[in-house]
Image (cartoon, coloured by chain):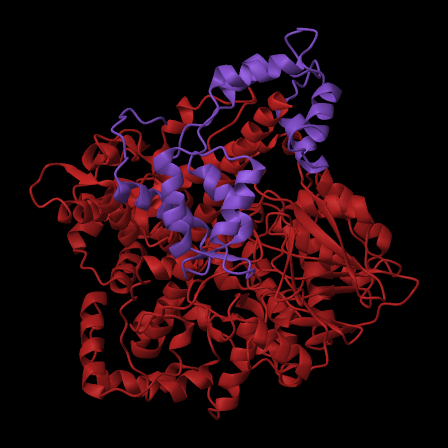
Chain colours: A red, B purple
Amino acid sequence: MRAAVLIQRWYRQYVARLEMRRRCTWNIFQSIEYAGEQDQIKLYSFFGFLMDHFTPASRNLISHIFRENEICRDSEWERYFCYKGIEVPDNYTGPHLTFPITFCGVSKLVEAFKQKQQLHARYVLQILGETWRLLRILPNINYVSVCHTKDITICGDLHGQLEDLLLIFYKNGLPSSEKPYVFNGDFVDRGKNSLEILLILFGFLLVYPNDVHLNRGNHEDHIVNLRYGFTKEILGKYRVHGKKILKLLQKIFSWLPVATVINEKVLVVHGGISDSTDLNIIAKVDRHRYVSVLRPPKMVRQALNDNKTVDCRNGDAGGPEEGRRRVRSLTDHSSATAQRSNLPRRSLHNLPISNQSSCSVEDELKKRRRLAGFDQSYREMKTSDSDSDPEFGETTEKDGNEWKQIVDLLWSDPMPQNGCILNEVRGGGRYWGPDVTEEVLGRHNLQLLIRSHECKQDGYEFCHNHRVLTIFSASNYYEVGSNRGAYIRMGPDLVPHFIQYQASRTCRELTLRQSVGWTERSALRALREQLFVHKSDLISAFQECDPNHTGLISLRNWASATESVLKLGLPWRVLRSQLVSRTQQGMVDYQQWIRELSITEPKLEVSDTSILETMYKNHSNLETIFRIIDTDHSGLISFEEFRQTWKLLSSHLEMEISDKAIADLAQSIDFNKDGSIDINEFMEAFRLVDLSAHTWQPETGAVASPV
Amino acid sequence: MAENNQCPETTESDIHKKIRAVFEAFDYESNNTVDVREISTIIYSLGCFPAQADLHDFIAEVEEDNTGYIHLERFLPVMTKVLLEQKFPPIPEDHLLQAFEALDKEKKGYLEPEELSKYMTQEGEPFTQEEMDEMLTALTDRDSNLIYYKDLISQLTIDPDM
């Protein structure tokens, strides 16, 4: 019937267009997310470089984050972490815990968190202390058996989203000896209930140590936590004892097992594998030496420093093709052929590196030192290098290999092509192909690899001929309606069954159109912010395409210039209609376009506007550095520390920033006018406000607040 | 965000650019191929309204011998011809309205979900159950559980991408 056909065709077209928009939106979020991770790793590598090459004085500023193998013994730490001195006041209305902890106790805790109560620091330290003690006797790899009477449940990333964990428990039941669970890492960061999730998982672990299995994720890492919100969450919730809690968590994270094997056939790890993955090696490492996986143990670094090249350019992320490679898909495809730039990069992959002449090394060092405002001769530094560091010992290549094994497990991603290459998008781990999957699984006599680490539209996704399964349990990860979460149920037949869900009643009722619309608006907001913070670079790039100063450039130039600045690998031409409201005969008025991005700057009076832009661009790096420097976790830093922060950052970015500019900046943001700067106020002041959010007309009539 | 200009991008090179841009968004391996299952989405995104049969024919013309992949080299000329000749033009709003009215035999001004389902899943180029469920979720008014097609037609028209 003609009428039916017309309607069907119209509707199919409509759905396809929506799908197109959804993919673009997804790509936006993912690109920004991965660029952020890469950024973090670059920053951390930079600190590593500073640690290896600068004076003890300057290193003191940041050295404490690298104190990995402390000489204190565990018994001393136990004394430090002891909860006994902490009193619970009478007016405390939160849950009380008794030890040894029982199933009832943990259920009560779950209930309390549902009611949005907060657990007192005394009990937090108590649970964490018990957890630490337990984890120390667990092996690196959990071996689990599934039998006929009980299935096992496997969950992926939760990222502080308590609602999702509660939803899983509601649908699937609480953990118990009849209901074993594996939680595959990334419990913390981004969501606002990371601690509550940890406490619940640890609680069940303590009650059922044989039936609850936790794998470490790349976010179970205090350096990553500095940037992605967990540190902030703890310090915000526990002003007095936060620091202690964080320290204990550092230890706990390092003691988390790194893998689980089910029925000797199914391997569960957070990130993935590489061509060198060897479970026999992994089983024997001292996993707790890797407090942060982002940096190899000191011993390795000493050996490598001797013949390391020091090209510290942060490296171009490469042109559009490289960028496009980062685009993740919603279906079975993944990133592309590596078109690796030949520029050496400041990433985890720089160790070890081939030799280069030492005079260029020295030049580079001198330049760095000048920028960072430190003066000491190179020779002095080399000798002071080994003195000030408490760690010493034999340097072995074995250590380097072991470290790589662990990084690969926690940071890698699968790719569709054969081979095994560096994962330059994230900055750590590998991309591994189906041939590597076959080889590694074959070598270990395994049949399936279950991993997490990547957000998937439907909560799960197979790849590599169904030999690799990604499971992701944080629904609405990017935005309300962006994706479902899922978990796996598996019986002795080892066939995975999936249960999907989406937390929040509102979004279940959203139609496809509405959820795409919502997510899309959010992604575009995020993108506009990125464009805004790069506006100077964008304008320069546009002007290069406009030698006659007409103020107009073609769409093609607009797209390629934008990609060259942002390096996100996004399909700009496709996104163009969403970002550029007007074109004149196929030409873009770029100055006007930038203005129309409608992002306001905070009302700070600063004489040097370029420093402002640096600040926006490096928002997260700045915050990370602040938190590192703020050793007493007071949330306040002194002017001198502020100055040092800028010196560090400018050194990392290879830009000059005058002392005067820094002083001006400090003055203008010293809100308390007492000579110290409140980190939170500072970061708040630099939150960009997207004006267009206020003019948005909601389609559903539901109230939406700007992100 | 509709375009104000209607300066037609009808030159062949402009059309090529349009096609490439959409194609690239689905070229996950950056090797100028896309999975054949994405083709309908790509064609629709370029503003075309082909029938299912048209899609099958199109795919047959461009697919690389049952590999499941379509290479840009073969796709580009065929798609360019389609766009230049406007082979699968958009459905004008009034035709669409007439189509709905044809289904609405009692001229109520709305359709009930069961009515629409019956037509969509049994007539023409039938929907799968999944497609039907999604359509009902998208089009049915939540309070009355009815489909007021007149309002929907203009609301759901998406602006062209380029």
Q: Is residue A280 above or below residue A666?
A: below
Which one is nearer the viewer's eye here, A271 or B143? B143
User: Residue A683: percent from the left, percent from the top?
Assistant: 38, 44
Q: Residue at x 16, y 55 (%)?
A: A658
The reply, left or right, for residue A359 in relation to residue B87 is left
Q: Answer with the quarter of the image where residue A277 lies.
A: bottom right
Q: Position of residue A319 (x, y in %)?
A: 30, 60
Nearer-the-camera pick, A329 or B160: B160
Give left or right: position of A535 versus A179. Answer: left
Residue at 16% x, 41% y is A607
Q: Residue furthest left?
A: A548
Would residue A151 be found to the left or right of residue B100 on screen?
A: right
Q: Residue furthest right?
A: A149
Picture coordinates of residue A433, whole percent (x, y)? 54, 71
Instruction: State whether residue A118 appears in this view.
Output: no
> Which residue corresponds to the image point at 21% horizontal and 45% vertical from the top-left?
A536
Expressed as whole percent of the image width and height from the top left, the position of residue A206 reads: 78, 63
The answer to whether any part of residue A327 appears in the image is yes
Give the left or right position of residue A400, taking residue A604 as reference.
Answer: right
Residue placed most toward the observer, A702 or A312: A702
Q: Is residue A526 above or below residue B66?
A: above
Residue drawn where x is 70% and y is 54% of the image: A199
Q: Quadrant of the N terminus of chain A?
A: top right
The foreground one among B20 and A495 is B20
All told, the count of numbered labels is 0
